Amino acid sequence: MITQARVCIVDDDDGVRESIASFFASVGMSVATFRAAEDLLSSERLPIADFVVSDLHMPGMSGVGLLQEVRARRPDLPVVIMTAFGTAEARAQATQLGVHAFLCKPVDPENLLVLIRTALVGDTANQ
Amino acid sequence: MSADNTVALVRNDLPAVRRPVLLLTATTLTVCILALDLRQSLDGAVAVLYIAVVLVVAPLGGRYVIASGIATGLLTTAAFLIGHLSHPTNGAYSRFVVSLVAIGITTLLSLRDRSSRTTLGEQARILELSHDTVIIRSNEDVILYWNVGAELLYGWARHEALGKKSSELLRCKYDDLDVDECLRTDGHWSGEVVRTRRDGTRLVLASRWLLRRDPEGRPVGVIESSSDLTARLRSDTERLASERRYRAIFDSAGFAMWESDWSQTVGTVLHAAPPGDLRPWLMSHPEIVGPAIQSGVIRHANQAAADLFGVRHREELAGANLCGRYLESGAGAFSTILAALADGETSVEAETRLKTFHGRTVDIVLRVTLLPEGRNWSHVLVMAFDVTERNEARARFEQASAELAHAGRVSMLGQLAASIAHEVNQPLTAIINYAKSATRWVDREEPRLDEVEKCLSSIVSNGTRAAEVIGRVRSLARKAEPQAEDVDLLDLIDGALSITRREAAAQAVQVVWERPVAPVPKVRADRVQIQQVLVNLIINGIQAMASSTRSARELCVYVKVLPAGDVAVHVRDCGTGFPDGQGTMIFEPFFTTKSDGMGMGLSICRTIIEAGGGTIWAQNNEGAGATVAFSLPACTVLRGVAATHI
């Protein structure tokens, strides 16, 4: 069930992170939020996560760094990266690492929902 | 009286060497007279010769005179008894009695002479002790007596002066006819004489002369006493010259100066004031200042004072008071002056503002000095320096600085536009998300109102956050007069970091804010301008690392409380640092290391910090990068805050 997808959100901005989490929760998803990339990597939610939404610039590990780590552990886990000031270099790096989407802030949660549905439906279809 | 006699008169003490000689002479004489007296062959009053013995020992003193009188009387009696007791005759008795009477009279006369000599000797010693000169001259103007005062003043020793003619020795100048006439008719004269010292110096003397006469009343010379007028005349001349100099300085001074009589002023103040510390009382009773000013009268003023007050002639100020000239704001300064003088200070300075007789308002610095000759503030010298132009220039400079600082802030905000937009967009994004989320929660088959409530609450908090960012930007953009207030630097650093957050993120700079847990003293400063400085330093630090190839881009902000109580804010980057020797130049106007920079940012920072009584400095770190820091004086030093890196 798409509505029961387990989504992880990583952003150091409390407002953005928690508002997206609230939105996903309102459509029935299981949401876990993290203030830093390192928190997610050390979390028990990572192995069972269906989708990851992460900010690019954060204190400590960046969104691209997180993507790299996730690829090493969960090569199939879709990761969306959001940023308010993304550079072409960061976008190219993320694309190379197989980012599901590289979005510019402000990000509409409806669009994120579409992305998640698309990704999870695709996965289901593929399976 | 001969010169030798005079010396003998003065030196009454008998030299020790003459005493045995006199005693030997007296003894020999006594033996001889006794031998003669015992010879029965001489039919005469031989014992009368004993008076010679008494006279010989007379210079030895009264005791010797009495002893010799008694001894010779006894010897006379003994000789009479030996020679005439067996066959006394009338002639022998009469010679014996005559001899005793002669010896007795001589003894008494010698004692009287001795007493007179003692008195004269004491008087002569008094003459010696006198600081004035005492000279005794004969009719022929020959010096017979010359005291120590004369030795000291004229420079000749006594033995050099005695026997010389005083007119030749001292080259004395005076009106001969007048003096002679006075001496002849009155027996004395007093007046000024001019004489010459041994070294050639001319002396002006106040002299008193007394005509000496012999027992028959014939003039035998003059005794004179003189005192030196030269020093007094010189002192008078110097005082006169000093007064002329003071007057010349007073009149020609390029600034306003007037002398006032404030004796009524002090009376007015002290009469009204209660016992105790005058200063706070005067400060809280400005109404007393008016009457105090009114009772201070100008004695005289210079032309510069007339020019300052806008009157044509300085004489117009004499007798006037400055009531009505001081503006209300000047009362404080006058209170300060009165309180300081009442505290015992002799000179005090205060700035005030007054209105000229033409209505022009001028800023003046008053320096008030109590002159030494005055009593109870009767002579007060007031110097006034017109600082109107200086104050206007300072005001223009402060206005220009404020405008420059504002221009710097506007420029800085332009530079931060993207960051500011981001800081506003973040909460706006959250608001939209929460709104959509709330809609979803409501639209569910079983609406979750608790979640809706959470969403609405979050919308409010994020809206507040956005408003705060906008408020911060508005305060930075505001063009207002700098206003000093007690400022918490920690809050300002929070705000500055918030505004520059996106800038740091864009440059992949990690900002470390070592916010102290312990309280930090507040500083007295303009909040907006200090925030401007903080933002400027943070942006500079971030930009210094923009071109750095180092993987670690860290900007560290920390606070220290310095030993003197000042609070210092440090912004440390790990960029390229300053080129050697440019650590101080970076605060100069138009100094920049950026190709697109004006080089005004740090210069404005320095102006702001120094205007607040603080210091700003920069130095390269031991490792990479540089640290720029500033300190500001604390309002109050909090106890328990160590002077260390918090």
Image (tube, rainbow, N blue to C red):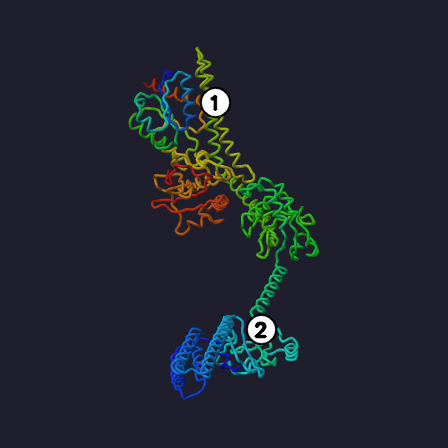
Label 1 crowd bin: few (<14), some (14–19), many (20+), radius 10 Å = many
Kindly identify which chain the residue marked by label 1 belongs to: B
| Type of the residue with mark 2 | Leu
Q: Residue beneath label 2, please? A: B205
Which image quadrant: the C terminus of chain A? top left
Count of numbered circles on the image: 2
Helix, strand or loop under label 1 = helix
Instruction: Give the camera-side residue of B351 and B341.
Output: B341
Which is more foreground, mark 2 or mark 1? 2
Task: Confirm whether residue B392 shows in the render.
Answer: yes
Q: Residue furthest bottom?
A: B41
> What x and y, as percent, mark residue B608?
50, 43
- Of labels 2 and 1, earlier in sequence is 2
* Tag 2–tag 1 contact (CB < 8 Å): no
Kindly identify which chain the residue marked by label 2 belongs to: B
| Disc assigned to residue B459 | 1
| Type of the residue with mark 1 | Ile
Helix, strand or loop under label 2 = strand
Label 2 crowd bin: few (<14), some (14–19), many (20+), radius 10 Å = some
Q: Residue furthest front?
A: B87
Instruction: Give the camera-side residue of B597 and B467.
Output: B467
> What x and y, as percent, mark residue B511?
39, 36
**Side of B409 relative to B80 (left or right):** right
| Disc assigned to residue B148 | none
> What x and y, as percent, mark residue B260?
63, 53
> What x and y, as percent, mark residue B314?
68, 56
Tell me the residue at 66%/78% (across/down): B181
Q: Residue furthest top?
A: B445
